Image: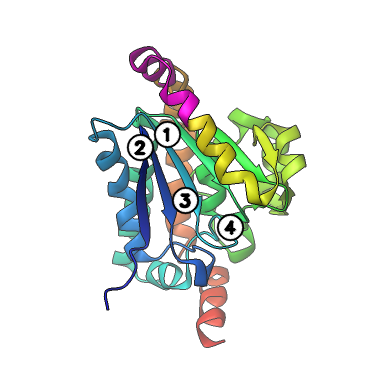
Amino acid sequence: MAEEPEIIIESDGPVRIVTLNRPESRNATSVTMHHAFLSLWRQLADDPEARSVVVTGAGKAFSAGGDYEMMQLSLDPVGRWRNVDEARRLLVELVHFPLPIVAAVNGPAVGLGASFLAFSDFVVMAESAFIADPHIAVGLVCGDGGVAWPLHVGLLRAKEMLLLGGRIGAEEAKSMGIANRVVSTSDVLAEATAIAHRLAAQPAGALQDTKRALNLYLESSLAGPVGHSLMTERYSMASDEHRTFVEGQTKS
């Protein structure tokens, strides 16, 4: 029997619904999923019938960030370079992706899962969901997009999010400007899909060029803060603190 793909794409008219499909690991990003997630955006951009995209998670989580296979890879110098280069290319793909992205945050969005929201165009959160970026707690620089948060929440709040790494509940996320809507868990995908259909019904050229203009703010961060943080994250992958964390997890 063939295994289920780690990313599922379904069509709902002009809307493409992307589901991160590793519910047994809370949709933590594996090496395979990271490769697939990188190529996904070019595939969707080349779909002539697609006008908007919804991204959600299977099961009870949106995404738990990178899994321990990804962390183990980061201990190897060659794997470390590949990991960070893929992260950089993924952020470039997201910034340049022409279609509107609606994140349907059905559960926890942690690490890379949280960073993805900073590059989305609309965020719908379940009332039970939360956001957290624990990079520092595991000995890593916040390098996979987290430093784009000041564009959304301001510098002081971004520092609180990243330096302390605590959980941010759905209502607080909305008040901070991280989420647009908070709904019940059972309604999050339906609400996100309805918004995606509204976006899909807009004149495509005007909408996409407006998104491109707005994303110039994010693009400027790629050359400055994000580029710097990715470079320093690569070095932090070799730190004693991160190695101790990863080795502790793999032995448990």
On residue 222, the disc is 1
Residue 236 percent location from the top left of the image: 49, 60
Q: Quadrant of the N terminus?
A: bottom left
The amino acid type, in three-letter code, at marker 1 is Leu
> Mark 4 touching mark 2, by CB under 8 A?
no
Look at the numbered disc 2 and give the secondary structure of its residue: helix
Residue 249 percent location from the top left of the image: 55, 79
Residue 85 percent location from the top left of the image: 32, 51
Q: Say whether residue 146 is visible.
A: no
Give above or below for 209 relative to 171: above
Q: CA distance from mark 4 to mark 2?
A: 21 Å
Q: At 36% across and 48% down in the image, what residue appears?
A: 10
Q: CA distance from mark 3 to mark 4?
A: 12 Å
Q: CA distance from mark 1 to mark 3?
A: 14 Å
Q: CA distance from mark 4 to mark 1?
A: 19 Å
Q: Which residue is mark 4?
A: 135
How packed mark 3 is, by other alpha carbons closer than 10 Å (few <14, some 14-19, many 20 or more), is: some
Q: Say whether residue 150 is visible.
A: yes
Give above or below for 55 relative to 234: above
Give above or below for 7 relative to 243: above
The amino acid type, in three-letter code, at marker 2 is Val
> Mark 3 touching mark 4, by CB under 8 A?
no
> Disc 3 vs disc 2: which is toward the camera?
2
Q: Which residue is mark 2?
A: 92
Residue range (magenta): 197-211
> Mark 1 touching mark 2, by CB under 8 A?
yes
Q: Nearer the viewer, residue 128 or 220?
A: 128
Lower sequence index among marks 3 and 4: 4
Q: Which residue is mark 3?
A: 232
> Disc 1 vs disc 2: which is toward the camera?
2
Look at the numbered disc 3 and give the secondary structure of its residue: helix
